[in-house]
Image: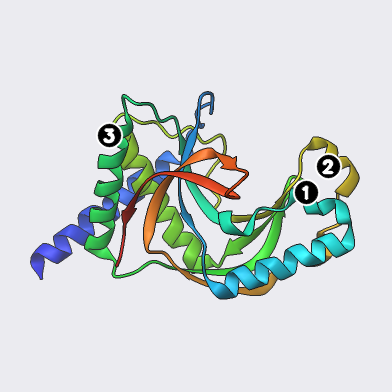
Amino acid sequence: MLLSKIFNFLFSAFLVQNHQDLKESSISPTGANAFVTFHVKSEDIVKNIQDVQDKLVSIDSRFNTTLQPIKSLHVTIIIVKITEENKKNANIALKDIAAMYKLFHSNMKINFKGISSFGNASLHAEPDEESQTKLMDFYVLVKERFEAHGIASLSQYSFHPHMSISVLDKDEQKILSGKWDSLKSSDFELGVEEVKNIQLCAMSLNQTAQDYNLIMSENLFE
């Protein structure tokens, strides 16, 4: 019991310190070619996202080319540059993350509630407040373990956990700006994802598979 309390105290101190580090300016993403993530496969969430995407297309058919492929639904944790030289270290980092996370948690259930946007650039599903806290803690752990093994997080922006539904380029923003506003809602219950593993994926979408190529993965829970 005492050992467990010590572990919890040390892990809490680790998270507090690293949450403070999030306020620091981010690194340029130059050269980033991969990202740490988990895919979203919940039947309820998938169905609800499909319904939202169908409504988008019914509002304006030009949304059809902006939709996130259903097979690729995911939450990005960090983006990184993976090379042949650091791939082994990335694998060690994933194993560290899984081992450390399982010390303090028996599962990772993420409840998606709400649809929002980043201005006119993207429409996305948001985790509820409790799940955002879980994911922020997870982000801190992932970032620290990768950096401990010499692989920097190259994310451009502060971490804001989300799952993309539709992403617009600059030209599409001029045409479609504001047309998805009627779909945004903080009360939209999308469903719960029970995360089983963490993945490192190539950043470029495989157009044939309509998903991101898997580089490596590590089980969090069976």
Residue 29: image x %, image y %?
53, 28
- Could you tell me which residue is drawn at 73 percent across and 70 percent down? 51
- Could you tell me which residue is drawn at 87 percent across and 64 percent down? 58
- Could you tell me which residue is drawn at 87 percent across and 49 percent down? 176
Residue 192: image x %, image y %?
51, 73
Seen in the image, is 41 located left or right of residue 138? Answer: right
The three-letter code of the residue at mark 2 reads Glu
Q: Are marks 1 and 2 in contact (CB under 8 Å)?
A: yes
The disc, 3 or 1, on the residue closer to the chain's N-terminal end is 1
Query: Which residue matches tag 1?
Result: 65
Residue 202: image x %, image y %?
49, 39
Seen in the image, is 132 located left or right of residue 181? Answer: left
Secondary structure under the numbered disc 2 in the rendered image: helix
The circle drawn on residue 89 is 3
Residue 185 visible at all: no
**Residues under labels 1 and 2: Cα distance?**
10 Å
The disc, 1 or 2, on the residue closer to the chain's N-terminal end is 1
The three-letter code of the residue at mark 3 reads Asn
- Could you tell me which residue is drawn at 29 percent across and 67 percent down? 222
**Residues under labels 3 and 1: Cα distance?**
37 Å
Residue 145 visible at all: yes
Front residue of 190/130: it is 190
